Image: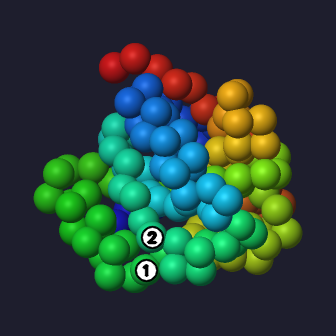
Amino acid sequence: MTPINADMTSLEIAPEVYSQLVLAAKAEAPNEACGLLAGKDRTVTRYYKMTNADASPDHFTMIPEEQFAAVKDMRKSGVRMLAIWHSHPASPARMSDEDMKLAFTPDTVYVILSLATPDAPSLRGYQITDNKPVEIKLNITKL
């Protein structure tokens, strides 16, 4: 799997994918939901729901077998992983200290959806540069 470029400044997200993220985050609350986002170029067109093996409101661990199945499907479908996604059920959409400790995948985007205000979910994306989160622009677009 080829990672995205480290110099990505924006990511496009299909509206149906955004809707799936909001539904997944609300369904898993008060625990964090998690998954992988895939597509082509800089456009996310697929959401792969993962199980949060930790069942925790503060962190997540994906099940390796689910990740491998998602990557296999990505290859078969001609898309690649563009981002790792998770929710923050009660805190802002920012990289927490825990998120930074667990940011093991270089050259990827970390997308966080906050339900701190349930009627107005907040979606933000970050890349890790020099061990610091750098926000990138996320656009919910029509395809």
Question: Eyeballing the image, is 56 above or below 27?
Answer: below
In this orientation, which residue lies closer to the viewer: 142 or 1?
Answer: 142
Please tell me in which quadrant of the rendered image residue 10 appears.
Answer: top right
Q: Earlier in the sequence, mark 2 or mark 1?
A: 2
Q: Eyeballing the image, is 101 above or below 50? A: below
Quarter that holds the C terminus: top left
Disc assigned to residue 19: none
- Decide if residue 94 is on the left or right side of residue 24: right
Q: Secondary structure at mark 1?
A: loop
**CA–CA distance between discs 2 and 1?**
6 Å
Q: Position of residue 41 (x, y in %)?
A: 39, 39
Res. 117 visible in picture = yes
Which residue position holds label 1?
63
Q: Amino acid at mark 1?
A: Ile
Q: Quadrant of residue 50?
A: bottom left
> Is the C-beta separation of discs 2 and 1 under 8 Å?
yes
Disc 2 residue crowd, few under 14, some 14–19, many 20+, Cα 10 Å = some
Residue 135: image location, x then y, percent: 75, 43
Q: Is residue 30 left or right of residue 27?
A: right
Q: Is residue 24 left or right of residue 70?
A: right
Q: Image point 32% across, 81% down: which residue?
A: 65
Which residue is the extreme one toward the top? 142
Name the residue tied to disc 2: 51
> Residue 107 or 110: which is nearer the viewer?
110
Which residue appears at 40% of the width and 17% of the height? 142
Image location of residue 26, percent across then percent down: 57, 46
Tell me which residue sits at (47%, 59%) in the image.
Answer: 35
Q: Is residue 41 above or below residue 29?
A: above
> In this figure, what is the number of numbered marks?
2
Q: What is the x, y in percent for residue 1?
A: 34, 66
